[in-house]
Amino acid sequence: MSSTEYSFPVAVSQLGEQDSRESQNARAVQWLLEQRGGSIVVVTPQKQFDSDILRRVAARPGVTHITWRGLFTGSLANHRVLYAWPDRKHLNDLWGADADALVVIEWGRAETATWIEDANPVRLLPGQTVQPRPQPAPVEAAEPLPNGVGEILEHIAAWAAGYDSGLKWNEEDKLKADMMNCPERWAPITVEQVRAKCRELKMRPNDIETITGFLERRKQGRRFNVRSTYRDFRFAQ
């Protein structure tokens, strides 16, 4: 099961070959209008943007237009949402959204690739609608991560679940300190193994990005600044 689970219809409108941005926008609008639910919310990076189609939608009676600056996940609840050109961070921030339907207008595939893998949306392309991939049959649990890393991630997931905003700085410092103080623990662990375990634990996408980013940086030989309180910290083995 993916880390980003939506209980409502989700789609992404992607730019195709010999396509235009306005056609891409029109596909998103059409799909959203076909969905059942509450009033429409249009989300754009700024109030000013270049799209006649989206401007007309945002100007409709009963439609709410908000920007990234004024956005919080709760404002999407019980609405049909058109989210234009979000970057990776803003897509991660959709974790926990309770919309009636959501369509994302993709700007670049590098920004949406991880979200698409997790969210498994309907893909809107020129002349083609690609339905979500079937859910895989249940499989046996993956091999436990060695050296106690699986248990460490379970502890971190439990900590993060207790906060609305995810991991706190002190928890991040503990993880960074352990990665530096116990390099032999982390040496055989791949970034993808950690990502898969974090997804299995249903961690927030932003927290997954943080944790995998730490490990990737350590494998590149980089060091971390850790506050003195946790500089010598090690998770118990």
Image (tube, rainbow, N blue to C red):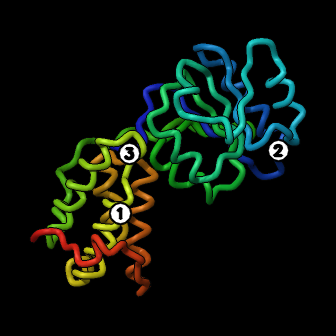
Dot 1 or dot 2: first in sequence order is: 2
- Quarter of the image for residue 22 reads top right
Q: Position of residue 131 (x, y in %)?
A: 54, 35
Label 3 vs label 2, nearer the camera:
3
Label 3 vs label 1, nearer the camera:
1
For the residue marked with disc 3, what is the amino acid?
A: Ser
Q: Which mark is residue 21?
A: 2
Cβ–Cβ under 8 Å for marks 3 and 1: no
Q: Give the side of residue 77 with respect to residue 143, left or right.
A: right
Q: Quadrant of the N terminus?
A: top left
Q: Secondary structure at mark 2?
A: helix
Q: CA distance from mark 3 to mark 2?
A: 30 Å
- Which residue sits furthest front? 228
Q: Which mark is residue 172?
A: 1
Badge 3: how crowded within 10 Å, few (<14), some, or many (20+)? many
Label 1 vs label 2, nearer the camera:
1
- Which residue sits furthest bottom? 221
Q: Which residue corresponds to the image point at 71% horizontal and 29% vertical from the top-left?
A: 42
For the residue marked with disc 2, what is the amino acid?
A: Arg
The number of callouts visible is 3
Q: Which of the two residues, 1 or 96, is positioned nearer the viewer here?
A: 96
Q: Which residue corresponds to the image point at 68% horizontal and 41% vertical from the top-left?
A: 69
Q: Mark 3 — residue?
A: 3
